[in-house]
Image: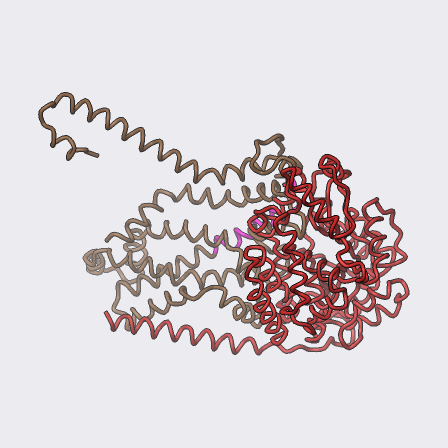
Chain colours: A red, B brown
């Protein structure tokens, strides 16, 4: 019997060793090459997109319009969002990667640019720099200052509620943190959960609360420094953020950790929860007959002396440095940057995004108008946690937020772990 | 099913006890079936919820909650899932991958199991253990190496790569099961066949394979379900949306921010049909095959 076990162990051991060896051999195999000069390779340009089905309307139209121009063929390849987000590093480092990708502006793009995986798009930008806001231009640059991103649109975040529900509950949208707490208390006293979130499948939604409390308490500059790794999570400033979050924590639906986002939206639509901090994309997820009833207000001001910063996540396109059709890529992206294309794209997004190009002409619905005005009045624009910090940093942030919601008393350990995890990711990427 | 110990204690009132025994038996039957029904309902409830949800509109689900009684009945969800999710192409892709994979891996592992169990192949135990040890490794560990290998072999993003990987992964376990089964077939049968002049190939095809049919059928049904329901390998090895199988197509109905439960439910129902059919067709040999492999 002992003989058998030792034999089994040796077999198992050698299998593991062989696998590790094999993994070692192949992972060194891919070297990054620069885009080739000379004529483009034949075949269509592949646009790898994370927008699936319900959301791909605008981008499908965009591709169709470009193909109709006869300057080349683009093929849209839609991949489920979660798969796309986790596979993007593999796509970019693979041997024959797709050419163009939908992605988030900011650090999320910069991470790839710093690994020299992205195509330099400065020639695309040279044509129409003036048509974009300066802030979006800055966002589209890598750390050395060359453009690697073409923005297609951006949207706002707000505290969403139903007008009829607020009327029934006898409350009005608050402006300051104290008013906010009073409103929450009043709603709670009537047996309705003031806030909800669906964290079981979308833990990143909790980061919206972190982002907003941080920019309202410590300001946008501190927030961006913190997310860039220049400040520590285990700091008095971040503790203040969690202290404020702890004030509202009892006002959340107690089941948020085990609720899916769809379920939370459903509870919200049924009036079981009164408010939901969401991005503009949330509008289509409420039932059609309640959409006119939907409204939002600006995240309340905690410290009036802090300049107001708002979250405006920017979406756009990046291109692989390894593409064998750089000329077609640039032609396509130049088209995407035009006012005409951006108008089309925004129309297809059902009022959930604002076009990035300033010359895009679009009739805005009331919520979009309010969102645009809110962003224009802001002194500073941040994006969203994963876009400002880099997509890989989202996981430790999710862990920190969800553990805090479950055990607020463990704050010391949570912040220590978060800081360590963030540093570790920064060191290895 | 006898309740003897209780009655032997009280022998005297025989008639009464026999009547009581009858009543007890009825009670036992009723209890057995009630419990059975409750357990089956508990198992069936999630499937029922999916079925019911798939016929409701998105607005109904959101406005009344997923647990409420349906207020609407629509087939639109199926139309939407079929068109939006590209379910037809996805089903075809799934079949292109699943059917060859099942056939190739079963043929190969039956041959391997035959050799290993019926002949004194040197190191046969080691060979078997190595094959099985491969199955002990978590799949996640191998995702990146295998994705790289397929890229360097220029088969990345092809259904062929998926078939090759699935065959390679299945073969170890199937061989192990078939090995155990074939060992139980009496050697006398093989000796008789040899005396009658049958060669190795003939013995394999005409003696062993027919006898191993229950085990092969059971494995066939199992592997069909496994491969058909696989998501991880397909999203790792494929990057073109038209090549994705049904599991990934269902996933693609889940939007980045907005997803319609009812459309996803409809797609899930469609995705479950092929494996259900296979299971129903093979179910008899499935249960028989499992028992045969394990008991002897």
Name the residue: 69% across, 68% down: A227
Q: Quadrant of the N terminus of chain B?
A: top left
Name the residue: 28% across, 50% down: B292
Name the residue: 66% across, 47% down: A195
Q: Is residue B295 above or below residue A163?
A: below
B24 and B220: which is toward the camera? B24
Whether residue A240 appears in this view of the structure is yes
Where, by quadrant of the figure, is residue A66 drawn? bottom right
Judge from the rendering whether residue A385 lies leftward or rightward of residue B244; answer left or right: right
Magenta stretch: includes residue B290:
no
Magenta stretch: includes residue B82:
yes
Whether residue A312 appears in this view of the structure is no
User: Residue B102 appears at what percent x and percent y?
Assistant: 44, 55
Q: Residue furthest left?
A: B12
Where, by quadrant of the figure, is residue A70 drawn? bottom right
User: Residue A306 appears at what percent x and percent y?
Assistant: 79, 62
Q: Which residues are magenta?
A: B79-100
- How many callouts does the rendering have? 0
A178 and A28: which is toward the camera? A178
Where, by quadrant of the figure, is residue A45 drawn? bottom right
User: Residue B159 appears at what percent x and percent y?
Assistant: 56, 59
* Magenta segment main secondary structure: helix
Judge from the rendering whether residue B208 lies leftward or rightward of residue A40; answer left or right: left
Q: Is residue A44 above or below residue B45?
A: below
B39 and B249: which is toward the camera? B39
User: Residue A4 appears at what percent x and percent y?
Assistant: 27, 70
Name the residue: 53% across, 38% down: B49
């Amino acid at each position: 019997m002992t003989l058998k076990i030792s034999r089994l162990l040796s077999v198992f051991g050698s299998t593991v060793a062989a696998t590790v060896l094999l993994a070692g051999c192949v992972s060194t195999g891919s070297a990054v090459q620069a885009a080739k000069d000379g004529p483009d390779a034949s075949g269509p340009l592949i646009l790898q997109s994370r927008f699936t089905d319900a959301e791909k309307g605008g981008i499908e139209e965009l591709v169709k319009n470009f193909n109709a121009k006869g300057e080349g063929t683009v093929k849209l390849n839609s991949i489920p969002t979660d798969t796309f987000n986790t596979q993007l590093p593999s796509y970019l480092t693979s041997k024959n990667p797709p050419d163009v990708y939908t992605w988030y502006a900011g650090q999320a793009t910069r991470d790839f640019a710093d690994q020299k995986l992205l195509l330099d798009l400065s020639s695309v930008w040279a044509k129409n720099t003036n048509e974009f806001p300066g802030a979006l231009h800055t966002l589209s640059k890598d750390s050395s200052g060359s453009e690697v991103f073409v923005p297609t649109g951006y949207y706002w975040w707000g505290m969403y509620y139903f007008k009829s529900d607020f009327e029934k509950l006898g409350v009005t949208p608050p402006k300051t943190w104290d008013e906010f707490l009073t409103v929450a208390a009043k709603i709670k006293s009537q047996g309705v959960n003031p806030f909800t979130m669906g964290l079981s499948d979308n833990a990143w939604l909790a980061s919206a609360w972190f982002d907003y409390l941080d920019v309202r308490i410590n300001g946008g500059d501190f927030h961006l420094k913190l997310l860039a790794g220049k400040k520590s999570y285990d700091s008095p400033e971040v503790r203040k953020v969690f202290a404020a979050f702890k004030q509202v924590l009892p006002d959340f639906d107690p089941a948020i950790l085990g609720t899916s986002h769809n379920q939370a939206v459903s509870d919200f639509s049924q009036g079981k929860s009164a408010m939901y901090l969401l991005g503009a994309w949330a509008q289509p997820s409420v039932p059609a007959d309640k959409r006119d009833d939907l409204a939002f207000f600006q995240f309340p001001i905690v410290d009036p002396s802090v300049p107001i910063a708002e979250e405006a996540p920017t979406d756009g396109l990046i291109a692989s440095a390894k593409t064998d059709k750089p000329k077609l890529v640039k032609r396509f992206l130049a088209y995407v940057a035009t006012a005409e294309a951006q108008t089309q794209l925004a129309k297809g997004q059902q009022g959930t995004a604002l076009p990035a190009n300033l010359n895009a002409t679009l009739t805005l619905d009331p919520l979009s108008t309010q969102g645009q005005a809110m962003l224009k009045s802001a002194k500073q624009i941040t994006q969203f946690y994963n876009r400002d910090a880099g997509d890989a940093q989202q996981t430790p942030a999710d862990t920190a937020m969800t553990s805090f919601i479950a055990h607020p008393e463990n704050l010391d350990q949570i912040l220590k772990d978060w800081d360590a995890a963030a540093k570790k990711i920064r060191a290895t990427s | 099913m006898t309740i003897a110990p209780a009655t032997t204690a009280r022998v005297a009132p025989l008639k009464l006890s026999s009547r009581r025994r009858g009543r007890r038996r009825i009670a036992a039957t009723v209890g057995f079936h009630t419990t059975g029904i409750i357990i089956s309902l508990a198992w069936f409830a999630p499937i029922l919820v999916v079925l019911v949800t798939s016929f409701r509109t998105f607005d109904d689900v959101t406005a009344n909650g997923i647990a409420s009684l349906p207020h609407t009945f629509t087939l639109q969800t199926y139309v939407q899932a079929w068109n939006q999710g590209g379910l037809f192409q996805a089903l075809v892709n799934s079949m292109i991958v699943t059917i060859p994979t099942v056939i190739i891996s079963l043929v190969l592992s039956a041959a391997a199991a035959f050799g290993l169990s019926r002949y004194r192949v040197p190191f046969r135990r080691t060979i078997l253990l190595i094959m099985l040890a491969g199955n002990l490794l978590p799949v996640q560990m191998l995702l990146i190496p295998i994705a790289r290998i397929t890229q360097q072999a220029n088969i990345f993003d092809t259904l062929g790569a998926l078939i090759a990987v699935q065959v390679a992964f299945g073969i170890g376990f199937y061989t192990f099961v078939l090995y155990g089964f074939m060992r139980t077939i009496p050697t006398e049968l093989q000796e008789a066949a040899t005396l009658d002049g049958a060669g190795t190939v003939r013995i394999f095809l005409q003696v062993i394979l027919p006898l191993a049919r229950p085990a092969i059928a059971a494995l066939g049904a199992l592997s069909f379900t496994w491969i058909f329901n696989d998501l991880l390998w397909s999203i790792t090895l494929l990057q073109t949306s038209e090549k994705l199988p049904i599991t990934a197509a269902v996933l693609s109905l889940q939007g980045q921010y907005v997803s319609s439960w009812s459309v996803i439910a409809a797609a899930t129902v469609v995705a479950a049909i092929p494996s259900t059919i296979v299971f129903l067709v093979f179910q008899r040999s499935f249960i028989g095959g499992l028992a045969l492999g394990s008991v002897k």
